[in-house]
Amino acid sequence: MVHHAGGCRPSLVVPANQASWEDLQAVFGAGGEARTCQCQWFKIGNAQWRSVSVTERAGRLREQTACGHPEASTTSGFVADLDGEPAGWCAVHRARPTCACCAPAFRGPSVRSQTVRTSATSMLDPEGNEFCIA
């Protein structure tokens, strides 16, 4: 199923530790830049990034996000859901959105920009305290 970007808004955006690892990997898709990068270029830089395998990059992201561990005290981003399907990811580095992507079925500027906006807003809990983003 392909969702058209016009008018699509994530129905739920949660800290990554509250999403499953499988949902985050579904957002990256089966191939392409997001799957290859695993949001590590901003973390380790170009020179080291090239020497680290995709499997190791994925392992680093899994540790950084703590996906599937809602009790974790830190995470590194947010996962968006649209109509019950994993739709978007926004990495947060030093309290700023740094990288965002959408699942292949949701690719388009609307879902990506809404995920970033909602993620930035979601950095505050209901009491106005910042979530701890690594």
Image (cartoon, rainbow, N blue to C red):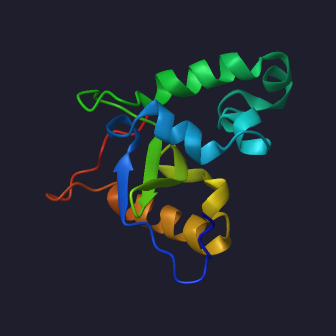
91, 24: nearer the viewer? 24
Q: Residue at x 35, y 50 (%)?
A: 14
From this view, report whether residue 17 is shown above or below residue 1: above
Camera-side residue of 24 and 124: 24
Residue 49 percent coordinates (x, y):
79, 25
Q: Residue furthest bottom?
A: 7
Which residue occupies the foreground of this view, 80 or 3?
A: 3
- In the displayed structure, would residue 110 be above or below residue 57? below
- Farthest residue, direction left: 127
Front residue of 33 and 74: 33
Question: Which of the 4 image quadrants contains residue 43?
Answer: top right
- The residue that appears at 41% across and 31% down in the rendered structure is 67
Image location of residue 71, percent across then percent down? 23, 28
| Picture coordinates of residue 128, whole percent (x, y) | 20, 59
Tell me which corner region of the image, top left, top right, bottom left or bottom right, holds residue 109: bottom right
**Count of marks, rendered view:** 0
The residue at 47%/68% (across/down) is 117
In the rendered view of the protein, which quadrant contains the C terminus? top left
Left or right side of 49 for 127: left
For the N terminus, the quadrant is: bottom right
Residue 28: percent from left, percent from top: 64, 43
Residue name at image x 50 percent, y 63 percent? 115
| Among the 4 quarters of the image, the one containing residue 70 | top left
